Image (cartoon, rainbow, N blue to C red):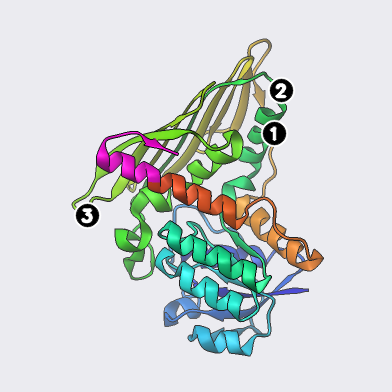
Amino acid sequence: MVRVALTGLGFMGKMHLSIYGRLDGVKVAALCDTNADNLSLKEGQAGNIAIEGGLGDLSDVKRFSNYKEMLEWGEFDYVDLCLPTQLHRDFTIRALDAGFHVFCEKPMARNLAEAKEMMAAAKSSGKYLTIGQCLRFWPVYVEMGKIIAEKTYGEVVSAELARYSQTPTWSTDNWIMNPANSGNAALDLHIHDVDMVLNWFGRPTGVTSSGSAGKDDSYGHIASIYDYPDKSVTSVGNWVCSDSFGFTMRALVVLEKAVLEMDSSKQPLFTIHPQEGERIAVDLDSNDGYYYELKDFVECIASGSEPRIVTPETAAESLEVVLAEIQSARNGEKIRL
């Protein structure tokens, strides 16, 4: 049985806790949060995706308000960090140096220097580090990726990815609305689709972006064009939508012999429109990417196999590309990669 110490019990921490309640092979050994309401799992934490199921039996779980004390207690195998982005570097390195594997939520860090320090700490400790780039595990993106890679309907002609959300006002102490902490939508939200662009198509040679910047010169909306020699690829990230709009994620991939369409606001979620014949509604696994990313990490620890789907290197590359997009939007010029 793999034991986890879950640190940070805001919206995403509660999401992870609900998954551990239905995931085999893992036991929640400890919970840690400096916020008393979070640590008591007080009701009312909102978010842009619903938390399903209960939180499991937590009667024998140790609770800590001090991270150092939890690490010193140490009766667990890995730390699951669901903390504000500006804390990722410090808390990750402290856990690795203390001898624990680390699952850290996305984005990996606020800048590349911090990401490189995290990678160096993982390498020197010999412990596993992975980042919560959950779309690489999300069934609909996995299925679309297989079709693209296997060229089931020929080569990709164009791809458009998008993520729209109401403004995320639900974070503890409203940390996410401070761009110095979160990087605004360009980094915190948009990095999901950037990661899929890299996963599906590899590294582009350049990127051109525009966006809606606030007074702090950060972006609640960003739109980007990625340079590939043989296809057109674009993506959009936005969290300045109205509360009544809610949240939606979309992907439209035009292939030589079909169109792949995914839209979380529609049913069916994933449809294939072949050049010949009727459209195909694709059946998908009911579990989501959060479930499968945690399942994968637990299985890696149990088997002694280093994570392969999301590595520190792939997460750092996604961060690098997003930062280049922000630079492009600010400077009004293409950034070479």
Which of 314/172 is in front?
314
Residue denoted by label 2: 152
**How packed is label 3: few (under 14 Cα within 10 Å), some, or many (20 or more)?**
few
Judge left or right: residue 217 versus residue 237.
left
Q: CA distance from mark 3 to mark 2?
A: 45 Å
User: Which residue shows up at 48% across the image and 40% down it?
Assistant: 249
Q: Can residue 130 be seen by looking at this rendering?
A: yes
Dot 1 or dot 3, earlier in sequence: 1
Q: Please identify the residue farthest to the right as the structure is shown.
A: 303
Indicate the position of residue 90 as horizontal and vertical percent values: 47, 73
Task: Say which residue label 3 marks.
Answer: 216
- Residue 71 falls inside the magenta stretch: no
Mark 2, secondary structure of its residue? loop
- Marks 2 and 1, how far apart in space? 8 Å
Looking at the rendered structure, the number of numbered marks drawn on it comes to: 3
**Is residue 241 visible to the viewer in this orientation of the structure?**
no
- Residues under labels 1 and 3: Cα distance? 40 Å
Please name the residue shown 45% across and 39% down the image.
Answer: 337
What secondary structure is marked by label 1?
A: helix
**Residue nearer the viewer, 288 or 4:** 4
Pick out the residue farthest to the top.
Answer: 276
- Residue 236 sits in quarter: top left
Of mark 2 and mark 1, the one earlier in the sequence is 1
Residue ranking furthest to the left: 215
Q: Residues within 10 Å of mark 2 (few under 14, many from 20)?
A: few
Whether pointer 3 and pointer 2 mark residues with C-beta atoms closer than 8 Å, the reply is no
- Residue 125 image position (x, y, % from top left): 64, 73
Q: On screen, 92 above or below 333?
A: below
Disc assigned to residue 288: none
Look at mark 1 in the image and give the residue it sits on: 146
Q: Which residues are magenta?
A: 324-337
Residue type at numbered disc 2: Thr
